[in-house]
Amino acid sequence: EIELTQSPATLSLSPGERATLSCRASQSIRTYLAWYQQRPGQAPRLLIYHASNRATGIPARFSGSGSGTDFTLTISSLEPEDFAVYYCQQRSTWPPEFTFGQGTKLEIK
Amino acid sequence: QEQLVESGGGVVQPGRSLRLSCAASGFNFNNDVIHWVRQAPGKGLEWVAATSYDGSNTYYAGSVKGRFTISRDNSRNTVYLQMNSLTAEDTAIYYCARDLRISPGYRYMDVWGKGTTVTVS
């Protein structure tokens, strides 16, 4: 089973700053990685899929990169609504089993 | 507007059963893989199960295999999650989510419901 480890657990930044979130897989998953945002009391929202593709309606300040085992979600300039928890997610080969990272909480400094 | 709405949550005693529903609207549901994902209080996301577009193929997390059954009724635009032999560890918000429509599928989830809460106590 492939594990995803996110770091840091908590990231404290101010609006306007750049955020860099990391997700590391226990073995190569090529570029089969997604990022989700979850605001308090809300359902998750797909931000990035295939490591670097923005989902429909996602602002350009969100970008994803990486391949193999190391992935990054970057938010270029934080808006107040970006303070939330972020999860990475991947799927095992077959039969499919989906795993999520433990999450990174992005909080206002 | 593409929408998924879960229902059927509640408080149930350990060892009992519960059936959740996920109703779709605003899109052609019949062609979509649908997932259930849960989130225990204060915890992260855990994938639970998925069903193919016609229900002929179903997949489960190891933690629920043999206890939970996912099914669908495309005539009602609804997916179900039958949960048996419930334990306190099944206490969570249960979300249904649509699989992102890219080939070959079974990768990511792009439309999510608001969730329904299950408490086993």
Image (cartoon, coloured by chain):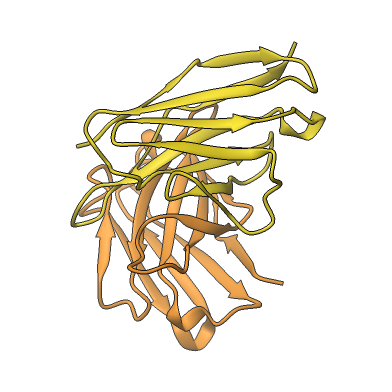
Chain colours: A yellow, B orange
Residue A43, horizontal then vertical, whole percent:
62, 46
A91 is higher (above) or lower (below) than B103: above
Residue A42, horizontal then vertical, whole percent:
67, 43
Residue B43, horizontal then vertical, whole percent:
49, 28
User: Which residue does the image show at 66% across and 77% down from the upper left?
Assistant: B26
Q: Looking at this view, is A80 or A30 the one in front?
A: A30
Judged left or right of residue A83, residue B27 is: left
User: Which residue does the image show at 46% across and 18% down from the upper left?
Assistant: A7
Q: Residue furthest bottom?
A: B75
Residue B21, horizontal then vertical, whole percent:
51, 66
Q: Looking at this view, is B66 or B12 the one in front?
A: B66
User: Which residue does the image show at 32% across and 54% down from the upper left?
Assistant: B84
A7 is higher (above) or lower (below) than A64: above
In which quadrant will I find the N terminus of chain B?
Answer: bottom right
- Residue A30 visible in the current orientation: yes
Q: Looking at this view, is A36 or A62 the one in front?
A: A62
Judged left or right of residue B51, residue B57 is: left
B79 is higher (above) or lower (below) than A98: below
- Residue B119 visible in the current orientation: no
- Quarter of the figure with residue B63: top left
- Quarter of the figure with residue A56: bottom right
Disc tally is: 0
